[in-house]
Image (cartoon, rainbow, N blue to C red):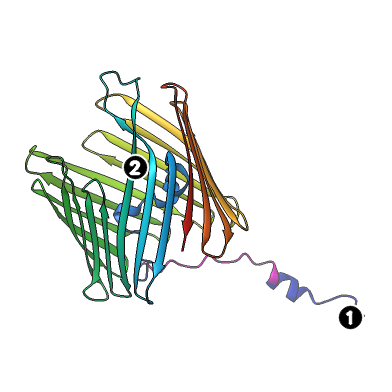
Amino acid sequence: MADLFPPLVTAQIDDKPKVDEKVDYSNLPCPVPYEELHREAYMSLKPDTFEGLRFDFTKGLNQKFGLCHSVMMGPTEVPSQSPDTVIKIPTAHYEFGANYIDPKLMLVGRVMTDGRQSARVRADLTDKLMVKANAQLANEPHMSQAMFNFDYMGSDYRAQLQFGNNALVGANYIQSVTPRLSLGGEVFWVGVPRKSGIGYAARYETDKMVASGQVASTGLMAMNYVQKVSDKVSLATDFMYNYFSREAVASVGYDYMLRQSRVRGKIDSNGVASALLEERLSMGLNFLMSAELDHKKKDYKFGFGLTVG
């Protein structure tokens, strides 16, 4: 009879409600960098679309050093008096680059046939302190840029100090408040136009979603939301608003990863739809197909590309 009727004490113990685990605020996770608050949304809402033909070839000489060649043929937009009119001229460029990648040092350089040059440096001075430098040189006056960043990563916070041309000085800080919520802020000052600003940001993430918001004294406000439907499918939406110009733009996008390909695309409130397909034909060989349709301006862009290496 004891086997047919189990003790009531065991049932009473199992029916007790589970007590939520207490949050250890002294051991919070390190948040994402302030400049990468919206990285999940940008993967879907800002695909790297292009127009024309694109060919990229990368050759690794050893485990750390490699060379890359890029050929781009397609139209280039030039400014026009009417914002609804698009003027394009046919262009072609060749780009040569070199990459040096080490666990604590990364050097990237690019040279184009039109005279533009770019360089990127990232060095880990310590386990928590990193320095980054970006430079772009152009033949056009006042188009060259340079930026230096010093990033410090703490146990549950990140801080960054920025210096750039035109007497740019900026700083940002982001702190984990809970295991899922992080808050941050930034300040900057530009000497040549004599402009300054301050901004605030928040980010909340779980295993299935990421929500982020950002507001600045320059009048810009941005909100993003990403829903991870599965390991291969993500849906995203964002809302951008400018307080001074009273302009607002909303968009929805998707990111779908298949076994041999990846599809990303979006459509916004201005009627602009774009999509990017990356198809892996074989090991080290990828095919790219890009499209962007702007029905308001009657501007339609299509591109094909091939990546080797």
Query: Which quadrant of the figure contains the N terminus?
Result: bottom right
Task: Give the side of residue 210 with respect to residue 12, left or right.
Answer: left
Main SS category, magenta section: loop
Total marks in image = 2
**Mark 1 highlights which residue?**
3
Category of crowding for the residue at label 1, using alpha-carbon neighbours closer than 10 angstroms: few (below 14), some (14–19), many (at least 20): few
Picture quadrant where residue 152 is located: bottom left
Q: Nearer the viewer, residue 1 or 255?
A: 255
Residue 268 location in percent, x, y?
46, 31
Can you give x and y, in whole percent of width and height, for residue 174 in the image?
Answer: 28, 57
Secondary structure found at label 2:
strand
Q: Amino acid at mark 1?
A: Asp
Instruction: Report if residue 15 lies within the magenta region.
Output: yes
Residue plotted at (24% across, 45% down): 114
Is residue 294 visible in the rendered image? The answer is yes
Q: Residue at x 34, y 42 (%)?
A: 92
Of badges 1 and 2, the one in the foreground is 2
> What separation in Å lies between label 1 and label 2 (alpha carbons)?
84 Å
Task: Check residue 73 in the rendering and tell me which mark sits there, or answer none.
Answer: none
Q: Percent from the top left, x then y, of residue 176?
A: 34, 60
| Left or right of residue 174: residue 44 | right
Looking at the image, can residue 235 be seen? no
Instruction: Give the answer, above or below, for where 231 lies relative to 248.
Output: below
Residue 65 is situated, as x and y percent measured from the top left of the image, at 33, 72
Whichever of callouts 1 and 2 sits on the residue coming sooner in the sequence is 1
Q: Residue at x 27, y 22 (%)?
A: 80
Q: Image height check: is 81 above or below 217?
A: above
> What are the residue bounds of the magenta stretch?
14-25
Q: Of 31 and 284, which appears nearest the observer?
A: 284
Residue 92 is marked as: 2
Mark 2 Cα within 10 Å, few/some/many (few <14, many 20+)?
A: some
Residue ranking furthest to the right: 1
